Image (cartoon, rainbow, N blue to C red):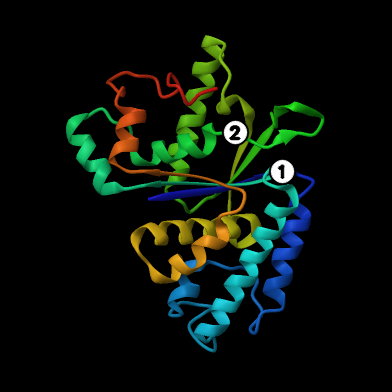
Amino acid sequence: MTLGCIVSSEAIWPDFEQAWSSVLDKAPHPLKSFHMAPAMSRKTHPFNKDWTKDQVDELVDQLLMVIHRFAMRSFGREFVIKTATLNLTDYRRFKLENIHLRRPEAICVNFCCGTPLPTDKANPEAELQDVIFYFDRQEKFLRTIRSNWIKGKKYLNKNQHGGWPKQFKEMLPLSAEDIPALQAVDVVAWITNGRYKGDDRAKRLFPKLFFGRMTKVFDYKAIKEEYAGDKKGTDPYAYKALR
Protein backbone atom coordinates (compact mmCIF):
# COMPACT_ATOMS: atom_id res chain seq x y z
CA MET A 1 0.00 0.00 0.00
CA THR A 2 1.39 3.40 -0.98
CA LEU A 3 0.22 6.92 -0.23
CA GLY A 4 1.87 9.76 -2.11
CA CYS A 5 1.64 13.53 -1.90
CA ILE A 6 3.27 16.63 -3.30
CA VAL A 7 3.43 19.74 -1.14
CA SER A 8 4.09 23.21 -2.48
CA SER A 9 3.06 26.86 -2.14
CA GLU A 10 0.16 28.44 -4.02
CA ALA A 11 2.65 30.53 -5.99
CA ILE A 12 4.12 27.44 -7.68
CA TRP A 13 1.01 25.45 -8.59
CA PRO A 14 -0.14 27.55 -11.59
CA ASP A 15 3.25 27.11 -13.31
CA PHE A 16 3.25 23.40 -12.53
CA GLU A 17 -0.25 22.90 -13.88
CA GLN A 18 0.60 24.77 -17.07
CA ALA A 19 3.74 22.67 -17.62
CA TRP A 20 1.86 19.42 -16.95
CA SER A 21 -1.05 20.31 -19.24
CA SER A 22 1.36 21.40 -21.97
CA VAL A 23 2.90 17.91 -22.06
CA LEU A 24 -0.55 16.32 -22.34
CA ASP A 25 -1.59 18.75 -25.08
CA LYS A 26 1.49 17.87 -27.15
CA ALA A 27 1.16 14.11 -26.72
CA PRO A 28 0.83 11.95 -29.87
CA HIS A 29 -2.86 11.71 -29.00
CA PRO A 30 -3.69 14.84 -26.90
CA LEU A 31 -5.09 14.16 -23.43
CA LYS A 32 -7.10 16.19 -20.95
CA SER A 33 -5.80 14.18 -17.99
CA PHE A 34 -3.43 11.32 -17.20
CA HIS A 35 -3.58 8.24 -14.98
CA MET A 36 -0.86 5.62 -14.70
CA ALA A 37 -2.89 2.38 -14.47
CA PRO A 38 -4.69 2.69 -17.83
CA ALA A 39 -1.57 4.11 -19.46
CA MET A 40 0.62 1.20 -18.42
CA SER A 41 -1.94 -1.46 -19.28
CA ARG A 42 -3.00 0.17 -22.58
CA LYS A 43 -6.29 -1.69 -22.24
CA THR A 44 -8.50 1.08 -20.84
CA HIS A 45 -9.72 4.38 -22.29
CA PRO A 46 -8.04 6.60 -23.44
CA PHE A 47 -5.10 4.21 -23.92
CA ASN A 48 -6.99 1.26 -25.39
CA LYS A 49 -6.21 2.14 -28.99
CA ASP A 50 -3.66 4.03 -31.09
CA TRP A 51 -1.10 4.26 -28.28
CA THR A 52 2.09 2.23 -28.62
CA LYS A 53 4.24 1.18 -25.68
CA ASP A 54 7.02 3.54 -26.81
CA GLN A 55 4.60 6.47 -26.99
CA VAL A 56 3.34 5.80 -23.47
CA ASP A 57 6.90 5.45 -22.13
CA GLU A 58 7.91 8.74 -23.74
CA LEU A 59 4.88 10.52 -22.31
CA VAL A 60 5.56 9.21 -18.79
CA ASP A 61 9.20 10.29 -19.06
CA GLN A 62 8.14 13.80 -20.05
CA LEU A 63 5.68 14.04 -17.16
CA LEU A 64 8.39 12.87 -14.77
CA MET A 65 10.66 15.57 -16.17
CA VAL A 66 8.05 18.16 -15.19
CA ILE A 67 8.02 16.84 -11.60
CA HIS A 68 11.81 16.66 -11.52
CA ARG A 69 12.23 20.18 -12.90
CA PHE A 70 10.08 21.74 -10.20
CA ALA A 71 11.79 19.69 -7.47
CA MET A 72 15.19 20.75 -8.80
CA ARG A 73 14.18 24.38 -9.04
CA SER A 74 13.38 24.55 -5.35
CA PHE A 75 15.90 21.92 -4.16
CA GLY A 76 13.07 20.34 -2.20
CA ARG A 77 12.39 23.46 -0.16
CA GLU A 78 9.19 24.54 -1.90
CA PHE A 79 8.20 21.44 -3.83
CA VAL A 80 8.30 18.32 -1.67
CA ILE A 81 7.40 14.81 -2.80
CA LYS A 82 6.39 12.35 -0.08
CA THR A 83 5.61 8.65 -0.22
CA ALA A 84 4.75 6.10 2.45
CA THR A 85 4.71 2.43 1.48
CA LEU A 86 3.42 -0.27 3.81
CA ASN A 87 4.23 -3.96 3.38
CA LEU A 88 0.83 -5.50 4.07
CA THR A 89 2.25 -8.97 4.75
CA ASP A 90 4.49 -7.52 7.45
CA TYR A 91 1.58 -5.44 8.74
CA ARG A 92 -0.60 -8.54 9.18
CA ARG A 93 2.29 -10.32 10.87
CA PHE A 94 2.68 -7.59 13.48
CA LYS A 95 -1.09 -7.25 13.84
CA LEU A 96 -1.06 -10.78 15.28
CA GLU A 97 1.31 -9.51 17.98
CA ASN A 98 -0.61 -6.30 18.65
CA ILE A 99 -4.33 -6.46 17.85
CA HIS A 100 -4.64 -2.73 18.58
CA LEU A 101 -2.28 -1.72 15.77
CA ARG A 102 -3.84 1.16 13.85
CA ARG A 103 -5.09 0.69 10.31
CA PRO A 104 -2.61 0.54 7.40
CA GLU A 105 -4.07 3.72 5.91
CA ALA A 106 -3.52 5.57 9.20
CA ILE A 107 0.19 4.64 9.22
CA CYS A 108 0.67 6.00 5.71
CA VAL A 109 -1.31 9.15 6.50
CA ASN A 110 0.74 9.74 9.63
CA PHE A 111 4.00 9.78 7.68
CA CYS A 112 2.84 11.92 4.79
CA CYS A 113 1.02 14.45 6.96
CA GLY A 114 3.18 14.36 10.08
CA THR A 115 6.56 14.95 8.42
CA PRO A 116 7.98 18.43 7.70
CA LEU A 117 6.39 20.82 5.23
CA PRO A 118 8.14 23.43 3.05
CA THR A 119 9.30 26.59 4.79
CA ASP A 120 7.21 29.75 4.78
CA LYS A 121 8.96 32.49 2.78
CA ALA A 122 7.36 35.13 5.01
CA ASN A 123 8.82 33.37 8.04
CA PRO A 124 11.90 31.32 7.02
CA GLU A 125 12.22 29.80 10.48
CA ALA A 126 8.80 28.14 10.25
CA GLU A 127 6.90 25.71 8.06
CA LEU A 128 3.88 26.67 6.01
CA GLN A 129 1.08 26.96 8.53
CA ASP A 130 -2.04 27.30 6.38
CA VAL A 131 -2.45 24.15 4.32
CA ILE A 132 -5.28 23.24 1.96
CA PHE A 133 -5.42 19.52 1.31
CA TYR A 134 -6.63 18.48 -2.14
CA PHE A 135 -7.52 14.81 -2.25
CA ASP A 136 -8.73 12.55 -5.03
CA ARG A 137 -12.31 11.86 -3.98
CA GLN A 138 -12.14 8.32 -5.36
CA GLU A 139 -9.24 7.26 -3.13
CA LYS A 140 -9.84 4.92 -0.18
CA PHE A 141 -7.44 6.97 1.98
CA LEU A 142 -9.89 9.88 2.04
CA ARG A 143 -12.11 8.42 4.74
CA THR A 144 -9.12 7.73 7.00
CA ILE A 145 -7.46 11.09 6.63
CA ARG A 146 -10.70 13.05 7.02
CA SER A 147 -11.66 11.24 10.22
CA ASN A 148 -8.13 11.60 11.61
CA TRP A 149 -8.12 15.28 10.73
CA ILE A 150 -11.43 15.97 12.46
CA LYS A 151 -10.56 13.92 15.57
CA GLY A 152 -7.06 15.37 15.65
CA LYS A 153 -8.24 18.97 15.61
CA LYS A 154 -10.57 18.31 18.54
CA TYR A 155 -7.85 16.53 20.52
CA LEU A 156 -5.17 19.14 19.81
CA ASN A 157 -7.42 22.07 20.61
CA LYS A 158 -8.41 20.44 23.88
CA ASN A 159 -4.82 19.70 24.88
CA GLN A 160 -3.24 22.83 23.35
CA HIS A 161 -0.77 20.93 21.22
CA GLY A 162 0.41 21.68 17.68
CA GLY A 163 0.51 19.32 14.74
CA TRP A 164 -0.65 18.79 11.21
CA PRO A 165 -4.42 18.76 11.95
CA LYS A 166 -4.12 22.41 13.01
CA GLN A 167 -2.06 23.33 9.96
CA PHE A 168 -4.65 21.85 7.59
CA LYS A 169 -7.31 24.52 7.18
CA GLU A 170 -9.42 22.78 4.55
CA MET A 171 -9.73 19.32 3.05
CA LEU A 172 -11.24 19.31 -0.41
CA PRO A 173 -12.13 16.05 -2.19
CA LEU A 174 -11.84 16.77 -5.91
CA SER A 175 -11.67 14.88 -9.17
CA ALA A 176 -8.15 14.04 -10.32
CA GLU A 177 -9.44 14.52 -13.87
CA ASP A 178 -9.46 18.27 -13.22
CA ILE A 179 -6.33 18.68 -11.07
CA PRO A 180 -2.89 18.15 -12.66
CA ALA A 181 -1.23 17.95 -9.24
CA LEU A 182 -3.41 14.96 -8.30
CA GLN A 183 -2.47 13.30 -11.58
CA ALA A 184 1.20 13.86 -10.72
CA VAL A 185 0.71 12.25 -7.31
CA ASP A 186 -0.92 9.27 -9.02
CA VAL A 187 2.24 8.87 -11.10
CA VAL A 188 4.45 9.09 -8.01
CA ALA A 189 2.37 6.59 -6.00
CA TRP A 190 2.06 4.08 -8.86
CA ILE A 191 5.78 4.05 -9.54
CA THR A 192 6.70 3.81 -5.85
CA ASN A 193 4.24 1.03 -5.11
CA GLY A 194 5.20 -0.88 -8.25
CA ARG A 195 8.89 -0.64 -7.46
CA TYR A 196 8.40 -2.38 -4.09
CA LYS A 197 6.08 -4.98 -5.63
CA GLY A 198 8.76 -5.84 -8.18
CA ASP A 199 7.17 -4.36 -11.31
CA ASP A 200 9.95 -3.97 -13.91
CA ARG A 201 8.31 -0.90 -15.46
CA ALA A 202 8.20 0.83 -12.08
CA LYS A 203 11.79 -0.18 -11.32
CA ARG A 204 12.95 1.64 -14.47
CA LEU A 205 11.06 4.79 -13.55
CA PHE A 206 11.72 4.85 -9.80
CA PRO A 207 15.21 6.47 -9.91
CA LYS A 208 13.70 9.47 -11.67
CA LEU A 209 11.66 10.23 -8.54
CA PHE A 210 14.62 10.27 -6.21
CA PHE A 211 15.40 13.98 -6.09
CA GLY A 212 13.64 16.02 -3.42
CA ARG A 213 11.63 13.05 -2.16
CA MET A 214 10.84 12.08 1.42
CA THR A 215 10.01 8.40 1.57
CA LYS A 216 9.40 5.69 4.13
CA VAL A 217 8.96 1.95 3.71
CA PHE A 218 7.14 0.29 6.58
CA ASP A 219 8.35 -3.29 6.77
CA TYR A 220 7.97 -5.42 9.91
CA LYS A 221 10.90 -3.75 11.67
CA ALA A 222 9.75 -0.19 10.91
CA ILE A 223 6.17 -0.91 11.95
CA LYS A 224 7.32 -2.44 15.23
CA GLU A 225 9.72 0.42 15.99
CA GLU A 226 7.12 3.15 15.50
CA TYR A 227 3.84 1.53 16.47
CA ALA A 228 4.57 -1.10 19.12
CA GLY A 229 2.98 1.27 21.63
CA ASP A 230 -0.45 1.22 19.99
CA LYS A 231 -3.05 0.11 22.50
CA LYS A 232 -6.78 0.22 22.97
CA GLY A 233 -7.92 3.76 23.60
CA THR A 234 -4.63 5.35 22.55
CA ASP A 235 -5.36 8.69 20.91
CA PRO A 236 -3.99 8.74 17.33
CA TYR A 237 -2.17 12.01 18.01
CA ALA A 238 -0.35 11.05 21.23
CA TYR A 239 2.76 9.71 19.55
CA LYS A 240 6.21 11.00 18.78
CA ALA A 241 5.66 11.79 15.11
CA LEU A 242 3.57 14.76 16.19
CA ARG A 243 5.67 17.91 16.35
Looking at the rendered structure, the kind of residue marked 1 is Glu
**Neighbour tally class for label 2: few under 14, some 14-19, many 20 plus, Cα within 10 Å:** some
Left or right, 172 with reference to 233: right
Left or right, 50 with reference to 141: right
Which residue is at 36% across, 29% downward? 226
Q: Residue furthest right?
A: 122
- Looking at the picture, tell me which residue is in the foreground, 186 or 191: 191
Name which quarter of the figure residue 20 lies in.
bottom right
Q: Is the residue 33 above or below the residue 192 in the image?
A: below
- Looking at the picture, tell me which residue is in the foreground, 217 or 22: 217
Which residue is at 34% across, 19% downward? 234
- Disc 2 marks which residue? 116
Q: Are marks 1 and 2 in contact (CB under 8 Å)?
A: no
- Disc 1 marks which residue? 78
x, y percentage for residue 65? 66, 65
Looking at the rendered structure, the kind of residue marked 2 is Pro
Q: Which mark is residue 4?
A: none
Q: Residue furthest top?
A: 159
Residue 164 in sight = yes
Which residue is at 66% across, 79% downward? 27
x, y percentage for residue 94? 23, 36
Residue 179 in sight = no
Q: Residue furthest left?
A: 96
Q: Secondary structure at mark 2?
A: loop
Left or right, 21 with reference to 193: right
For marks 1 and 2, the one nearer the N-term is 1
x, y percentage for residue 169? 65, 31
Q: Secondary structure at mark 1?
A: loop
Which residue is at 50% across, 83% downward? 53
Quadrant of the drawing holding the C terminus: top right
